[in-house]
Amino acid sequence: MELDDIRAWDLGALEQLEDSLSRRIETVADVQLQLADIGRLPAWLSEAGEVARRRFQVTADDLTDEAAALSAVGECARQTREAVAHLKKELADIEADAAADGMQVDDSGAVKVVDTAERSPEEAEAREQRRVELEARAKALILQAEDVSADAAQVLNKAAEGKIDDHGATTIDAAAAAGVSQGSLSAPAPPADAATNPAAANGYWQAMPDWQRAEVIAKHPEWVGNLDGIPSQARHDANIARIGTERDRLEHERDELQRKLDENVFGGTFTNDDAALW
Protein backbone atom coordinates (compact mmCIF):
# COMPACT_ATOMS: atom_id res chain seq x y z
CA MET A 1 0.00 0.00 0.00
CA GLU A 2 1.14 3.55 -0.74
CA LEU A 3 0.04 7.03 0.27
CA ASP A 4 -1.83 7.40 -3.01
CA ASP A 5 -4.06 4.50 -1.93
CA ILE A 6 -5.04 6.51 1.13
CA ARG A 7 -5.92 9.48 -1.07
CA ALA A 8 -8.04 7.22 -3.30
CA TRP A 9 -10.03 5.60 -0.46
CA ASP A 10 -13.70 6.44 -1.01
CA LEU A 11 -15.27 7.72 2.21
CA GLY A 12 -18.60 8.27 0.47
CA ALA A 13 -18.84 4.61 -0.53
CA LEU A 14 -18.15 3.50 3.04
CA GLU A 15 -20.84 5.86 4.35
CA GLN A 16 -23.34 4.54 1.80
CA LEU A 17 -22.54 1.00 2.90
CA GLU A 18 -23.21 1.94 6.54
CA ASP A 19 -26.58 3.46 5.62
CA SER A 20 -27.56 0.48 3.49
CA LEU A 21 -26.71 -2.01 6.24
CA SER A 22 -28.56 0.04 8.83
CA ARG A 23 -31.71 0.01 6.70
CA ARG A 24 -31.31 -3.73 6.14
CA ILE A 25 -31.15 -4.36 9.90
CA GLU A 26 -34.35 -2.36 10.37
CA THR A 27 -36.03 -4.54 7.73
CA VAL A 28 -34.83 -7.73 9.44
CA ALA A 29 -36.16 -6.49 12.78
CA ASP A 30 -39.53 -5.72 11.21
CA VAL A 31 -39.74 -9.21 9.67
CA GLN A 32 -38.95 -10.81 13.03
CA LEU A 33 -41.74 -8.83 14.70
CA GLN A 34 -44.20 -9.85 12.00
CA LEU A 35 -43.27 -13.52 12.42
CA ALA A 36 -43.80 -13.24 16.16
CA ASP A 37 -47.21 -11.63 15.64
CA ILE A 38 -48.32 -14.36 13.23
CA GLY A 39 -47.14 -17.08 15.60
CA ARG A 40 -49.26 -15.60 18.40
CA LEU A 41 -52.56 -15.71 16.46
CA PRO A 42 -55.04 -17.05 19.08
CA ALA A 43 -57.16 -18.93 16.53
CA TRP A 44 -54.20 -20.88 15.17
CA LEU A 45 -54.18 -23.75 17.67
CA SER A 46 -54.05 -26.69 15.29
CA GLU A 47 -51.11 -29.02 14.74
CA ALA A 48 -50.39 -27.09 11.54
CA GLY A 49 -50.15 -23.93 13.61
CA GLU A 50 -47.63 -25.53 15.98
CA VAL A 51 -45.52 -26.75 13.05
CA ALA A 52 -45.62 -23.26 11.57
CA ARG A 53 -44.58 -21.70 14.86
CA ARG A 54 -41.59 -24.02 15.11
CA ARG A 55 -40.66 -23.11 11.58
CA PHE A 56 -41.05 -19.43 12.40
CA GLN A 57 -38.65 -19.87 15.32
CA VAL A 58 -36.06 -21.38 12.99
CA THR A 59 -36.52 -18.42 10.66
CA ALA A 60 -36.29 -16.01 13.59
CA ASP A 61 -33.00 -17.62 14.62
CA ASP A 62 -31.73 -17.20 11.07
CA LEU A 63 -32.71 -13.54 11.24
CA THR A 64 -30.70 -12.94 14.43
CA ASP A 65 -27.71 -14.54 12.73
CA GLU A 66 -28.20 -12.21 9.78
CA ALA A 67 -28.58 -9.18 12.06
CA ALA A 68 -25.32 -10.05 13.81
CA ALA A 69 -23.48 -10.34 10.49
CA LEU A 70 -24.99 -7.12 9.17
CA SER A 71 -24.08 -5.27 12.35
CA ALA A 72 -20.54 -6.60 12.28
CA VAL A 73 -20.02 -5.43 8.72
CA GLY A 74 -21.73 -2.13 9.51
CA GLU A 75 -19.48 -1.49 12.49
CA CYS A 76 -16.48 -2.46 10.41
CA ALA A 77 -17.54 0.03 7.72
CA ARG A 78 -18.05 2.78 10.29
CA GLN A 79 -14.71 2.29 12.00
CA THR A 80 -12.94 1.94 8.66
CA ARG A 81 -14.49 5.20 7.47
CA GLU A 82 -13.39 7.01 10.64
CA ALA A 83 -9.89 5.53 10.45
CA VAL A 84 -9.53 6.45 6.78
CA ALA A 85 -10.82 9.99 7.41
CA HIS A 86 -8.13 10.34 10.09
CA LEU A 87 -5.47 8.99 7.72
CA LYS A 88 -6.49 11.46 5.02
CA LYS A 89 -6.34 14.37 7.46
CA GLU A 90 -2.95 13.30 8.78
CA LEU A 91 -1.60 12.92 5.25
CA ALA A 92 -2.83 16.41 4.30
CA ASP A 93 -1.14 17.84 7.43
CA ILE A 94 2.13 16.06 6.68
CA GLU A 95 2.17 17.25 3.07
CA ALA A 96 1.37 20.82 4.14
CA ASP A 97 4.16 20.80 6.75
CA ALA A 98 6.60 19.35 4.22
CA ALA A 99 5.72 21.93 1.56
CA ALA A 100 6.08 24.79 4.05
CA ASP A 101 9.60 23.56 4.82
CA GLY A 102 10.71 23.08 1.20
CA MET A 103 10.19 19.31 1.21
CA GLN A 104 8.11 16.80 -0.72
CA VAL A 105 6.51 13.48 0.26
CA ASP A 106 6.45 10.65 -2.29
CA ASP A 107 3.99 7.77 -2.37
CA SER A 108 6.29 5.42 -0.46
CA GLY A 109 6.37 7.85 2.47
CA ALA A 110 9.91 9.05 1.80
CA VAL A 111 10.45 12.78 2.34
CA LYS A 112 13.05 14.67 0.35
CA VAL A 113 14.26 18.26 0.33
CA VAL A 114 13.37 20.12 -2.86
CA ASP A 115 14.30 23.63 -1.73
CA THR A 116 18.09 23.66 -2.03
CA ALA A 117 18.60 27.24 -0.91
CA GLU A 118 21.66 27.55 1.27
CA ARG A 119 21.04 27.46 5.03
CA SER A 120 23.23 27.76 8.08
CA PRO A 121 24.49 24.47 9.57
CA GLU A 122 22.11 24.90 12.51
CA GLU A 123 19.11 25.50 10.25
CA ALA A 124 20.06 22.57 8.02
CA GLU A 125 20.36 20.27 11.02
CA ALA A 126 17.00 21.37 12.38
CA ARG A 127 15.33 20.85 9.01
CA GLU A 128 16.87 17.40 8.69
CA GLN A 129 15.35 16.48 12.05
CA ARG A 130 11.97 17.72 10.84
CA ARG A 131 12.39 15.71 7.63
CA VAL A 132 13.09 12.53 9.61
CA GLU A 133 10.02 13.13 11.77
CA LEU A 134 7.77 13.81 8.76
CA GLU A 135 9.04 10.69 6.99
CA ALA A 136 8.34 8.58 10.10
CA ARG A 137 4.81 9.99 10.27
CA ALA A 138 4.19 9.35 6.56
CA LYS A 139 5.42 5.77 6.70
CA ALA A 140 3.37 5.16 9.84
CA LEU A 141 0.27 6.13 7.84
CA ILE A 142 1.03 3.34 5.35
CA LEU A 143 1.42 0.78 8.15
CA GLN A 144 -1.82 1.95 9.73
CA ALA A 145 -3.66 1.80 6.38
CA GLU A 146 -2.42 -1.75 5.83
CA ASP A 147 -3.60 -2.74 9.30
CA VAL A 148 -7.04 -1.17 8.77
CA SER A 149 -7.37 -2.94 5.42
CA ALA A 150 -6.34 -6.31 6.88
CA ASP A 151 -8.73 -5.99 9.84
CA ALA A 152 -11.62 -5.02 7.56
CA ALA A 153 -10.90 -7.95 5.24
CA GLN A 154 -10.92 -10.33 8.22
CA VAL A 155 -14.37 -9.12 9.33
CA LEU A 156 -15.78 -9.33 5.81
CA ASN A 157 -14.39 -12.85 5.32
CA LYS A 158 -15.89 -14.01 8.62
CA ALA A 159 -19.26 -12.57 7.63
CA ALA A 160 -19.11 -14.19 4.18
CA GLU A 161 -18.23 -17.55 5.74
CA GLY A 162 -21.05 -17.39 8.30
CA LYS A 163 -18.65 -17.12 11.23
CA ILE A 164 -20.26 -14.12 12.90
CA ASP A 165 -21.96 -15.40 16.07
CA ASP A 166 -25.17 -13.88 17.45
CA HIS A 167 -24.11 -15.14 20.93
CA GLY A 168 -27.47 -16.85 21.44
CA ALA A 169 -29.49 -13.67 20.98
CA THR A 170 -33.27 -13.93 20.68
CA THR A 171 -33.86 -10.33 19.62
CA ILE A 172 -32.49 -8.28 16.77
CA ASP A 173 -31.12 -5.63 19.16
CA ALA A 174 -29.15 -8.22 21.12
CA ALA A 175 -27.90 -9.83 17.92
CA ALA A 176 -26.86 -6.44 16.57
CA ALA A 177 -24.90 -5.71 19.76
CA ALA A 178 -23.16 -9.08 19.44
CA GLY A 179 -22.30 -8.28 15.83
CA VAL A 180 -20.87 -4.86 16.68
CA SER A 181 -18.38 -6.42 19.08
CA GLN A 182 -17.16 -8.70 16.26
CA GLY A 183 -16.87 -5.95 13.67
CA SER A 184 -14.39 -3.73 15.49
CA LEU A 185 -10.96 -2.94 14.13
CA SER A 186 -8.21 -3.79 16.61
CA ALA A 187 -5.53 -1.27 17.46
CA PRO A 188 -2.13 -2.25 16.00
CA ALA A 189 0.96 -2.81 18.10
CA PRO A 190 3.85 -0.34 17.78
CA PRO A 191 6.39 -0.97 15.00
CA ALA A 192 9.43 -3.09 15.81
CA ASP A 193 11.77 -0.08 16.03
CA ALA A 194 9.50 2.05 18.23
CA ALA A 195 11.52 1.31 21.38
CA THR A 196 14.68 2.83 19.89
CA ASN A 197 13.17 5.31 17.43
CA PRO A 198 11.07 8.09 19.03
CA ALA A 199 10.07 9.41 15.59
CA ALA A 200 8.63 5.99 14.65
CA ALA A 201 6.80 5.78 18.00
CA ASN A 202 5.32 9.23 17.50
CA GLY A 203 4.32 8.42 13.91
CA TYR A 204 2.58 5.26 15.11
CA TRP A 205 0.61 7.21 17.70
CA GLN A 206 -0.35 10.03 15.34
CA ALA A 207 -1.56 7.59 12.67
CA MET A 208 -4.25 6.12 14.94
CA PRO A 209 -7.65 7.77 15.51
CA ASP A 210 -8.56 8.68 19.09
CA TRP A 211 -10.64 5.56 19.74
CA GLN A 212 -7.73 3.27 18.86
CA ARG A 213 -5.39 5.26 21.08
CA ALA A 214 -7.89 4.84 23.91
CA GLU A 215 -7.99 1.09 23.22
CA VAL A 216 -4.20 0.86 23.45
CA ILE A 217 -4.18 2.66 26.81
CA ALA A 218 -7.03 0.54 28.17
CA LYS A 219 -6.00 -2.89 26.87
CA HIS A 220 -2.27 -2.69 26.07
CA PRO A 221 -0.75 0.08 28.24
CA GLU A 222 2.56 -1.80 28.29
CA TRP A 223 2.94 -1.03 24.58
CA VAL A 224 3.38 2.72 25.06
CA GLY A 225 4.04 3.47 28.74
CA ASN A 226 7.82 3.50 28.27
CA LEU A 227 8.06 4.72 24.67
CA ASP A 228 9.85 7.98 23.95
CA GLY A 229 7.91 9.80 21.23
CA ILE A 230 4.48 9.05 22.70
CA PRO A 231 2.85 12.20 24.17
CA SER A 232 3.52 12.53 27.90
CA GLN A 233 -0.17 12.54 28.87
CA ALA A 234 -0.78 9.31 26.95
CA ARG A 235 2.23 7.68 28.63
CA HIS A 236 0.98 8.85 32.00
CA ASP A 237 -2.49 7.41 31.35
CA ALA A 238 -0.97 4.13 30.14
CA ASN A 239 1.23 3.78 33.19
CA ILE A 240 -1.67 4.55 35.51
CA ALA A 241 -3.64 1.83 33.72
CA ARG A 242 -0.83 -0.64 34.43
CA ILE A 243 -0.91 -0.16 38.20
CA GLY A 244 -3.57 -2.79 38.84
CA THR A 245 -1.82 -5.45 36.77
CA GLU A 246 1.58 -4.65 38.29
CA ARG A 247 0.13 -4.76 41.79
CA ASP A 248 -1.39 -8.19 41.12
CA ARG A 249 1.93 -9.46 39.73
CA LEU A 250 3.93 -8.19 42.69
CA GLU A 251 1.46 -9.52 45.24
CA HIS A 252 1.62 -12.94 43.59
CA GLU A 253 5.42 -12.84 43.63
CA ARG A 254 5.41 -11.75 47.28
CA ASP A 255 3.10 -14.62 48.27
CA GLU A 256 5.23 -17.16 46.40
CA LEU A 257 8.40 -15.94 48.15
CA GLN A 258 6.69 -16.06 51.52
CA ARG A 259 5.53 -19.62 50.82
CA LYS A 260 9.07 -20.70 49.93
CA LEU A 261 10.44 -19.14 53.12
CA ASP A 262 7.76 -20.74 55.27
CA GLU A 263 8.56 -24.17 53.80
CA ASN A 264 12.34 -23.78 54.12
CA VAL A 265 13.65 -24.81 57.56
CA PHE A 266 16.68 -22.58 57.02
CA GLY A 267 14.54 -19.59 56.14
CA GLY A 268 16.44 -17.34 53.79
CA THR A 269 19.89 -18.30 55.00
CA PHE A 270 20.97 -20.08 51.83
CA THR A 271 18.80 -18.20 49.33
CA ASN A 272 18.00 -14.63 48.35
CA ASP A 273 14.27 -15.18 48.92
CA ASP A 274 14.17 -13.06 52.09
CA ALA A 275 15.93 -10.17 50.33
CA ALA A 276 13.61 -10.52 47.36
CA LEU A 277 10.60 -10.53 49.68
CA TRP A 278 11.82 -7.40 51.40
Image: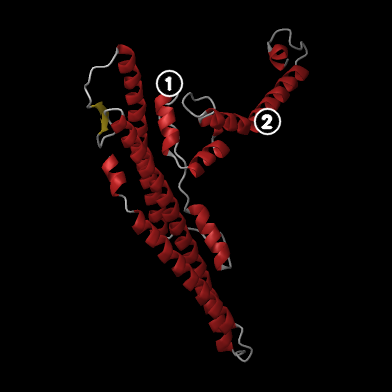
Question: Does label 1 or label 2 sit earlier along the sequence?
Answer: 1
Q: Is residue 155 above or below residue 4?
A: below
- Which dot marks residue 9? none
Q: Nearer the viewer, mark 1 or mark 2?
A: 1
Q: Where residue 172 sits in the image (x, y, percent)?
A: 55, 67
Q: Is residue 163 visible?
A: no
- Which dot marks residue 196? 1
Q: Where residue 56 sits in the image (x, y, percent)?
A: 53, 78
Q: Which quadrant is home to the N terminus?
A: top left
Image side of residue 16 versus residue 187, left or right: left
Element on which disc 1 rests: loop
The residue shown at (40%, 32%) is 203
Q: Where residue 138 sits in the image (x, y, percent)?
A: 33, 34
Viewer-proximal residue among 192 and 238: 238
Q: Is residue 117 above or below residue 83?
A: above
- Answer whether labels 1 and 2 touch (C-beta < 8 Å): no
Q: Where residue 208 sits in the image (x, y, percent)?
A: 44, 40
Tell me the kind of residue under disc 2.
Answer: Asp
The residue shown at (76%, 12%) is 267
Q: CA distance from mark 1 to mark 2?
A: 29 Å
Image side of residue 29 versus residue 117, left or right: right
Count of marks, rendered view: 2
Residue at label 2? 248
